[in-house]
Image (cartoon, rainbow, N blue to C red):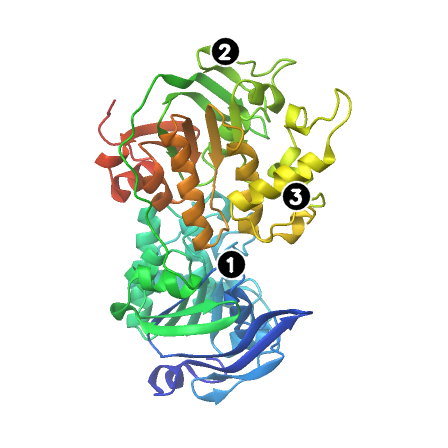
């Protein structure tokens, strides 16, 4: 039992967590400004906000990763100093991080006890942990084989190990940071059943997520942060996704873009028997075949790591591949001397890569330089055959930044100094403004604020409505369903099924993402 006592935490009428006037700055940047928050015991409390709103900083203060510049923390009514994560654990707080903190070649049992060993030998600790895992499997559906090696587990089961680690340390307060980002919908549903069971047993849970649908489905109360401040705390049953989005952004936001029915034309992209080897020599893509037609969006859904990244890199000319790829009926070189990204652009392909910072931008270069990458031979950028027109590049970049609502509108600002959402808009502006026949776009709104998501979705659909073909890869099912006309689901390097977007739902897609194929469809 920890210093405060488990029974005290469960029976106290005081808030399980109370933050009073918390402030934290990093140099001139104010991450948290005078934030107060009260979380009732035995509840699931959601925290939402745009990127940079201060959510993670606030939770890092609660878990002892950062120290607040000002303010107080109360746990179950008692003032509590939390200088480090050890003190947080002693106060009954556990945290499940977005990127799991597991030793992959250790067993589940070894990971659970790591750092919490007691006694001169491991035997008593391992025995206690094994019994706990058995009890929790029965009580909360946290079934995981104690002897399994972590690297052999699915992502969903790895997350259960993280929860078990916290419970083994007798946590009565659990913080979960974006817990469903790498889960299939069935795994996410299972997680929320686990959290509901934990809440019903008196645990207090803080859920950080950008997915408003999950907030509505899983939480009892929700707090909204904007620009480092707490703007509202509401009962979840008394609010709506639209109200939460407006509180997050400061204006009304369309959560689902209205789109007219697609009018598909001739095939623009034809892929037949595409095969790509992975980094370790394994087959990452296995005879992939599909078609994308003019005037339609083909969405590619799947849990990260099932071949989507390799598909994007192969089609974008970044990685060699085998098979046949045609654009507007003309075969393109997949592995020869003329197989790179420049050749793809000449074929009418524009590519917005998954990782904008490593593949889409040079972070230390200015906006106007990034806007010219790959298109520096454009006549609009040339003064003579041999000289680039720098002023024209700056001027045209300023026009594009305005058109795509990039802030600030400063062609001379280096890419690193734009926010993530504005970096993404720069890449989209560069690629879409080239009027491509085919846009290949990966994770278009990853790490992007909700207001920018609305803008990006509108640009993608405008391209479709102009008669262009779009291949969209995203791990966000809401995004796939909102933008796509047809949806292909990838599992283990293969397309396991294709569905018309108007005739499917998250449940069916989730089963396909888990490798459970339904009835074959055309």
User: Which of the two marks, 3 or 2, is nearer to us in this view?
Assistant: 3
Q: Secondary structure at mark 3?
A: helix
Asked if residue 140 is positioned above or below residue 486 in the image, the reply reads below
**Marks 1 and 2, the one that precedes in the sequence:** 1
Instruction: Determine which residue is flagged by label 1.
Output: 51
Name the residue at 52% across, 63% down. Answer: 113
Question: Where on the picture, by quarter, is residue 345?
Answer: top right
- Visible in this render: residue 298? no
Residue 324: mark = none
Instruction: Determine which residue is flagged by label 3.
Output: 367
Q: CA distance from mark 3 to mark 2?
A: 34 Å
Q: Nearer the viewer, residue 329 or 314?
A: 329
Relative to 187, 155 lies left or right? right
Q: Nearer the viewer, residue 102 or 495?
A: 495
| Residue 49 percent location from the top left of the image | 45, 63
Whether residues under marks 3 and 2 lie with C-beta atoms below 8 angstroms apart, the answer is no
Asked if residue 99 is positioned above or below residue 474 in the image, the reply reads below
Question: Where on the picture, by quarter, is residue 473?
Answer: top left
| Residue 24 percent location from the top left of the image | 60, 74
**Residue neighbourhood size for the residue with mark 2, other residues' Cα within 10 Å, grouped as few (<14), some (14–19), many (≥20):** some
């Amino acid at each position: 039992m920890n210093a405060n006592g488990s029974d005290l935490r469960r029976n106290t009428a005081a808030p399980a967590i109370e933050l009073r006037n918390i402030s934290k700055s990093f140099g001139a940047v104010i991450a948290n400004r005078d934030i107060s928050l009260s979380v009732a015991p035995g509840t699931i409390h959601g925290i939402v906000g745009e990127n940079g709103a201060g959510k993670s900083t606030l939770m890092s203060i609660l878990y002892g990763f950062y120290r607040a510049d000002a303010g107080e923390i109360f746990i179950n009514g008692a003032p509590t100093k939390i200088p480090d994560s050890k003190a947080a654990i002693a106060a009954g707080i556990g945290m499940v991080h977005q990127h799991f903190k597991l030793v992959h070649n250790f067993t589940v049992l070894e990971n659970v006890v790591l750092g919490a060993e007691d006694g001169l030998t491991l035997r008593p600790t391992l025995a206690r942990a094994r019994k706990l895992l058995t009890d929790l499997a029965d009580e909360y559906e946290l079934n995981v084989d104690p002897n399994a090696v972590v690297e052999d587990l699915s992502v969903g089961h790895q997350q259960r190990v993280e929860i078990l680690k916290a419970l083994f340390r007798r946590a009565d307060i659990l913080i979960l940071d974006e817990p469903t980002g790498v889960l299939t919908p069935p795994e996410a549903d299972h997680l929320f059943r686990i959290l509901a069971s934990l809440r019903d047993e008196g645990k207090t849970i803080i859920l950080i997520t950008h997915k408003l649908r999950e907030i509505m489905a899983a939480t009892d109360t929700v707090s909204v942060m904007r620009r480092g401040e707490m703007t509202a705390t509401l009962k979840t049953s008394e609010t709506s996704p639209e109200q939460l989005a407006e509180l997050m952004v400061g204006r009304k936001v369309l959560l689902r873009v209205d789109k007219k029915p697609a009018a598909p034309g001739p095939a623009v992209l034809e892929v037949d028997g595409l095969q790509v080897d992975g980094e370790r020599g394994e087959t990452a893509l296995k005879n992939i075949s599909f078609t994308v037609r003019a005037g339609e969006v083909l969405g590619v859904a799947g849990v990260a790591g099932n071949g989507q990244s390799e598909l994007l890199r192969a089609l974008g000319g970044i990685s060699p591949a085998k098979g046949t790829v045609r654009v507007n009926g003309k075969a393109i070189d997949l592995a020869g001397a003329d197989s790179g990204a420049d050749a793809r652009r000449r074929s009418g392909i524009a590519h917005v890569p998954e990782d904008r910072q490593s593949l889409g931008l040079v972070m230390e270069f200015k906006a106007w330089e990034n806007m010219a990458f790959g298109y520096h031979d454009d006549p609009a950028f040339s003064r003579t055959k041999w000289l680039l027109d720098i002023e024209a590049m700056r001027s045209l970049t300023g026009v594009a930044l305005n058109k795509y609502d990039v802030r600030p509108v400063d062609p001379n600002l280096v890419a690193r100094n734009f926010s993530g959402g504005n970096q993404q808009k720069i890449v989209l502006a560069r690629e879409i403004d080239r009027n491509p026949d085919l846009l290949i776009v990966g994770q278009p709104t990853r790490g992007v604020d909700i207001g920018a998501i609305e803008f990006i979705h509108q640009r993608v659909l405008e391209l479709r409505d102009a008669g262009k073909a779009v291949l969209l890869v995203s791990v966000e099912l809401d995004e796939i369903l909102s933008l796509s006309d047809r949806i292909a689901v990838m599992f283990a390097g293969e397309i396991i099924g294709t569905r018309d977007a108007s005739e499917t739902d998250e449940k069916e897609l989730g089963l396909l993402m888990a490798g459970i194929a339904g009835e074959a469809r055309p």
